Structures are given as C-alpha cells and as structure tokens.
Image: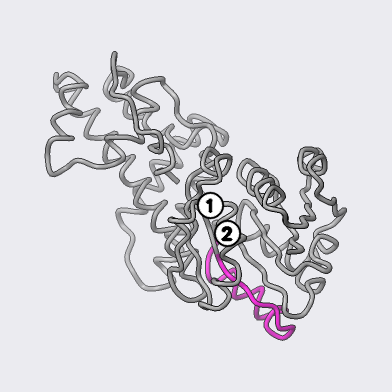
C-alpha cells in the first residue's frame, strides 16, 4: 500500500520501519528531518510537509504526542485537505474521541475520508520488537482492511477491534489510568511497610502470595527494584498528559474521578520534582523518600521476557 507516516518519535520511528520491511511504499514526515535517516536508507520517501506526506496516500498513520498536535497537523498542517477521497486515516496517538471528532467535523467527513483510532501499548521496546498491543475503534470493514498494516507494527494476537470510533482512544486511556493508579498504590504500600520495619523482599513476596497480587507488582516495578531504572523511555510530561486526558474524559461522560485526580496530582508533583523528561516510574521516588530508602532487592526474580510490554 501507499502509506504516509507522520511522527517519527520513540515509538513512530520503529513502527514506520516495520511498515517498510513489510513491503509497503512509505512516505514519512517529522518535524526533525534527521529522524527519517534510517527510513530513507531503507527505501522510504521523505515529505517536506505533513500535507505532502498525505498526498496520494491510500492510508495515513499519525503517531503524535498529544491531541493538540494531531489537530494542528490535520487542520492547520493541511493533511485533511490533502488526503485523497476514500483514503483511510489511522491515528495511533494517545488522544480523545472529542479531538478526532473536531477534525472530522471540519474536513474529513465531507470529503469521504475514513478513519480509525488505534492507540498502542507496549512502549518503545514493544514498538522496536513489532509487538505492540493495538486497540482499534472504527467500523469492522475498515478494521479488516487495515489489519495487515496494523499487524506489521503489532503483535497479531493483540491487535483488537474494541468498538466504534473513539473506543480505541478510550480503552488506551483507561489502560494508562489504571496502570498509573497501580504505580501509586503499590509505591504507597511498599513505603508504608518498609517504614514500619518489614523487609522489602518479604513484603513483596507476601503481597504476591495474596489476593492483592498484581502484574505491576510482579513484573513492571522490577525495573526499579532490580536496577533503579525509572523508565526514561516514557517521560513524565507524557504521563501527566495522559492522566489529564483520562480525567477530561471522565468529566465528558459524567463519571466522578476523585481517585484519578489524586493520582494525577502525585504524578504532577513528581514531574515538578524530577523534571518533564524523568521516567514514568519517577513517582516511586517520592515514596522512596518517605520510606527513607530506595526500593531495591538484592536478587530480584527474573522478569518474563515480555513483562516490560505490559506497561503503557
């Protein structure tokens, strides 16, 4: 297929590379031309503008940092007007149904451009390995048509059609929200138990043997416990953005978000302390400070090979 790909960041660069390896004719664009060097060496074409990337594309993928940039690229960047009639736009950014609807209402619907929302989980490591989880909102026909493209970037067993337009965005936001909540709750429990005198390893083993066990406690936090790695591949600025989007969604649908708002406050406090580019696990450091010790295990159990892919 003739595919346009806009957004060659930590995730998008790997995703576009997989599409090239799958044999598609890929045209790429990013605000940083140097980000496309590898793709051009593999045979991709470069577009100087977002609109040029969309021209003649049968399918356009956007992988951008936030809804505002998605709107800027589609509307003010000329992409929506440049897409051929009948083309398919797949937005794989973490965004909101409302943002996509604004774009569609202004341009896409009257021009016959189809669309899917297909945000991803698995982080940069999953993108590099081609093992992303992809949550797709849209019609069943458009999902089936796009499946070979999506499977080139993700784990075929984890490319899921989750409902109509907007459902993909919603599922991704709910995954992130619950994961961030797990992080805060786990950190608070570990800090309290350690400060009360229980050995960290004994406390974790006890929790894992109980009904309170979680994948986060068993796998995801191991990067901190084993190596002091707070996961710089996903920045605090992005984590706080996603939390804000989830809380906005709760307001839009009339669901109170007291717990989520508290989690967001804790993440924003960590961002203020540790910086926008600090890793998404940085709120753990707030609780390490409360405990008076870093959370480290001398001989942590080895994580499963795909444990890292369970996070956001």
Q: Which secondary structure dominates the residues rendered in magenta?
A: helix
Q: Position of residue 139 (x, y in %)?
A: 53, 78
Identify the magenta region. 95-117
Name the spot of residue 148 as percent of width and height, x first: 59, 62
Relative placement, left or right, of 153 versus 244 is: right
Foreground: 254 or 223? 223
The front one of 286 and 107 is: 107
Q: CA distance from mark 2 to mark 1?
A: 6 Å
**Residue at disc 1, secondary structure:** strand
In this picture, is 284 found above or below 310? Answer: above
Q: Which residue is mark 1?
A: 154
Q: Count neighbours of disc 1 (C-alpha within 10 A) and say few if under 14, some if 14 to 19, many if 20 or more.
A: many
**Residue at the spot of label 2:** 150
Q: Are marks 2 and 1 in contact (CB under 8 Å)?
A: yes
Q: Position of residue 66 (x, y in %)?
A: 60, 55
Magenta span includes 108 = yes
Residue at x-position 41% and y-position 20%: 227
The percent position of residue 86, horizontal first and vertical second, equals 72, 79
Q: Is residue 227 magenta?
A: no
């Amino acid at each position: 297929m003739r595919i346009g790909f806009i957004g060659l960041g930590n995730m998008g660069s790997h995703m576009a590379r997989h599409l090239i390896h799958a044999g598609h004719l890929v045209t790429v664009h990013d605000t940083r031309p140097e980000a496309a060097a590898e793709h051009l060496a593999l045979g991709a074409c470069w577009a100087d503008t977002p609109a040029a990337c969309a021209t003649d594309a049968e399918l356009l993928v956007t992988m951008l940092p936030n809804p505002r940039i998605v709107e800027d690229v589609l509307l003010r960047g000329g992409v929506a007007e440049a897409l051929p009639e009948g083309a398919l736009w797949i937005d794989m950014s973490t965004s909101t149904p409302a943002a996509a609807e604004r774009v569609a209402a202004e341009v896409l619907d009257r021009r016959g451009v189809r669309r899917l929302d297909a945000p991803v989980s698995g982080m940069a490591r999953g993108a590099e390995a081609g093992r992303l989880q992809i949550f797709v909102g849209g019609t069943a026909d458009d999902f089936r048509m796009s499946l070979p493209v999506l499977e080139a970037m993700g784990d075929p067993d984890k490319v899921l059609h989750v409902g109509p337009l907007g459902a993909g965005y919603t599922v991704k936001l709910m995954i992130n929200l619950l994961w961030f909540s797990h992080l805060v709750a786990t950190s608070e429990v570990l800090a309290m138990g350690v400060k009360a005198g229980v050995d960290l390893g004994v406390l974790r083993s006890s929790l894992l043997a109980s009904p309170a066990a979680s994948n986060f406690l068993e796998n995801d936090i191991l990067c901190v416990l084993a190596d002091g790695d707070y996961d710089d591949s996903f920045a605090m600025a992005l984590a706080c953005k996603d939390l804000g989007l989830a809380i906005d969604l709760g307001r839009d649908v009339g669901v109170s978000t007291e717990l989520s708002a508290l989690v967001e406050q804790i993440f924003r406090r960590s961002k203020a302390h540790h910086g926008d580019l600090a890793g998404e696990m940085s709120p753990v450091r707030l609780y390490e400070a409360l405990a008076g010790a870093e959370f480290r295990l001398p001989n942590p159990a080895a994580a499963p090979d795909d444990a890292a892919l369970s996070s956001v």
